[in-house]
Image (cartoon, grey):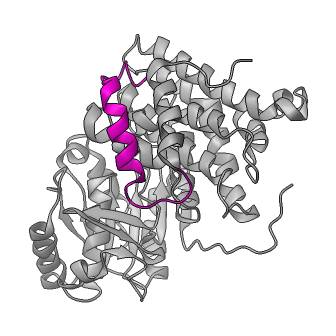
Amino acid sequence: MFFPDNYEFYCPVKINSGNKALEHLPVELDALNAVKPLILTDRVVVKKGLIRRITSAFKDSGITMDIFDGIPQAPDLKLVRRLMNIYRDTGCDSIIAVGGGAVVDTAKALDIVVSGKPEDLRDVAGNDLIKNPLGPLVFVPTASGTGFETSGFAALGGMVFSSRFLMPDLVVIDPRMITSEKADAVVATSMIALAHCAEAYTCPAKNPMIDTYAYPAMQFIGENLVNVIKSGDRKGRLALANAATMAGIVFSGTSRGIIHELGWTVDDISGHSHGICMGILLPYALEYNINSEGYHMSDMLLPIAGPEIYAGTAKNLRARKAINFIYDMQHDIHDISKGGIPLTLKDAGISKDALQGIAGAAVGDGHTGFNMDDCMVILEHAWEGKPIISF
């Protein structure tokens, strides 16, 4: 087992997962010294009847709440100011974000504002500019998301925020809230989680505590993703929701890698979500770096493929086997979705002429871990669907 000379790890997130997890919300809020939450969600969640399940969990608690169900896909500062007024005028003292993506980004932005003043948002955009703990924040996932809900990251109105204080205090994963979704949404969320965990095995910050979260997240994805796409297995959906939760925590403790940067850049021009793009790029990026010093890709085989395959694979072939497992999983998903989930960047509608621009944009922020040549090798092979190393 890899053991670093020194490491740092921080995780304030408590996770309640399982049957009737919602019913513990009143007790958990009390532990956070909160008695009046503002529930934030969107119309899709309301239409599915999921908010009624939240409110039912509070029926005998004596806790009152306010609900705002109009979070759009692209929230802005104007909305945050409006929510601030609702929060303060109604005497709320905590936030429950029900859903993913924009709902959680809005909740985090609102938490910054109500813990200070509206002008704080612009002042703290960037890395580690939030210096004090924020108010209680609870996240209740309903299915897919961006993969950053439990991380210390948020984005709103063109601004990006990064701080350990943006990690939620509590995540409540209740199977009654994890609804069935289209294959591309499930795959996108799972591939973001898998990419975040894979990059934890290839970054300088790798440590035993990060492994504690990355290992089960990869295991849950390896064991359940294909079957959930095939049959909509309810228990498998719960496992994937747990994987996404843990992977967000992993991402907060590691540095952004080449898969993350390229995935977001491809997303801007492909029309596919960054999760689908990360999924396409993932095995090629791992393959490109398979012999890199300080990487621990061979360790990935155990969680993603299981102990039997791990034990039956020679040590020097384990990294290759782990990558092949991801390739096989991609092909299974592609077949089950009848081609709806693209296998290559070409399938995703990316022009080969666009690859140079994608690589330039990915390294444009001054990343030191990779360069244009690294990006081009990965992009060209992912575009064509041709493994970088032939075995």
The answer to which of 286 and 32 lies nearer the viewer is: 286
Count of number-bearing discs: 0
Viewport quadrant of the N terminus? bottom right
Instruction: Report whether 93 appears left or right of 140.
Output: left
Q: Is residue 82 visible?
A: yes
Residue furthest to the front: 373
The answer to whether residue 158 is above or below residue 236 is below
Give coordinates of residue 76: x percent, y percent.
Answer: 14, 63
Give coordinates of residue 319: x percent, y percent.
Answer: 76, 35
Q: Is residue 145 visible?
A: no
Instruction: Report whether 351 appears left or right of 16.
Output: left
Give coordinates of residue 244: x percent, y percent.
Answer: 51, 48
**Quarter of the image where one finds residue 352:** top left
Q: Which residues are magenta?
A: 344-370
Instruction: Report whether 214 appears left or right of 116.
Output: right
Can residue 288 be found in the magenta stretch?
Answer: no
Write the residue at 19% across / 78% down. Answer: 87
Can residue 351 be found in the magenta stretch?
Answer: yes
Write the residue at 77% across / 33% down. Answer: 306
The answer to whether residue 171 is above or below residue 225 is below
The answer to whether residue 253 is above or below residue 347 is below
Give coordinates of residue 366: x percent, y percent.
Answer: 43, 61
The answer to which of 138 and 369 lies nearer the viewer is: 369
The answer to whether residue 33 is above or below residue 366 is below
**Quarter of the image where one finds residue 159:** bottom left
Viewport quadrant of the C terminus? top right
Write the residue at 81% across / 33% down. Answer: 318
**Quarter of the image where one finds residue 136:** bottom left
